[in-house]
Amino acid sequence: MLLFESYFYLALARFLKGRPFSKIAPSLGNKMAETTFALNASEKEALMGISQAIHLMSRYTFWESQCLVKAIAAMKMLERRQIESTLYLGTAKDEKGEFIAHAWLRSGPFYVTGSEGMERFTVVNKFAKRIESGM
């Protein structure tokens, strides 16, 4: 079921990516804020399962499912499970001196998506998706 859910959220995230960023940014959480790096052991299995499902299903979508799409999809899946996360947006220059961008998602100390190569990027924006108590 996790694979079907990840496919659905990858489609939703791809749709959102096609909209103006200023329209979707409020749904990503608190701008320029981060969630805790503390490990919540009870969430570890869910984080690993979502990470694996997103990476696997992103290979089989007929639309582009790169870093930002995967990060948004994983964030929405975590939100559904009442798990906090932080989405990071970064920029860097490639070998030709061209600007490139990357997105990754962290929950606690675990990088759910986009950890590959993230150290090359300078964070230019981040969004903390906090889960309010009593929801």
Image (cartoon, rainbow, N blue to C red):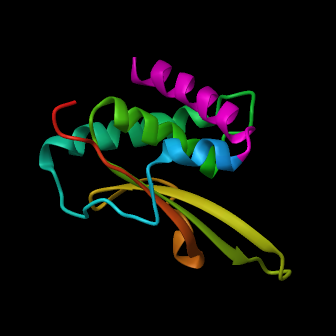
Q: Does the magenta stretch include residue 101?
A: no
Report x, y in % for residue 65.
66, 40
- Foreground pick, 123 / 10: 123
- Foreground pick, 84 / 4: 84
Report x, y in % for residue 124.
58, 72
In this picture, is 29 found above or below 120? above
Report x, y in % for residue 9.
53, 28
Asked whether residue 71 is in view, the answer is no
Image position of 80 (left or right of 134): right
Q: Does the magenta stretch include residue 7?
A: yes
- Foreground pick, 77 / 64: 77
Q: In which quarter of the image is the C terminus?
A: top left
Q: Residue sitting at 74 percent across and 27 percent down? A: 62
- Foreground pick, 106 / 51: 106
Image position of 85 (left or right of 19): left
Q: Residue sitting at 18 percent across and 57 percent down? A: 39
Q: Residue sitting at 52 percent across and 76 percent down? A: 119
Name the chief secondary structure element in magenta: helix
Query: Picture quarter containing residue 77?
Result: top left
Report x, y in % for residue 8.
55, 22
In this picture, is 80 found above or below 85? above
Q: In which quarter of the image is the N terminus?
A: top left
Tell me which segment is drawn in magenta.
1-20
In this picture, is 26 found above or below 16? below
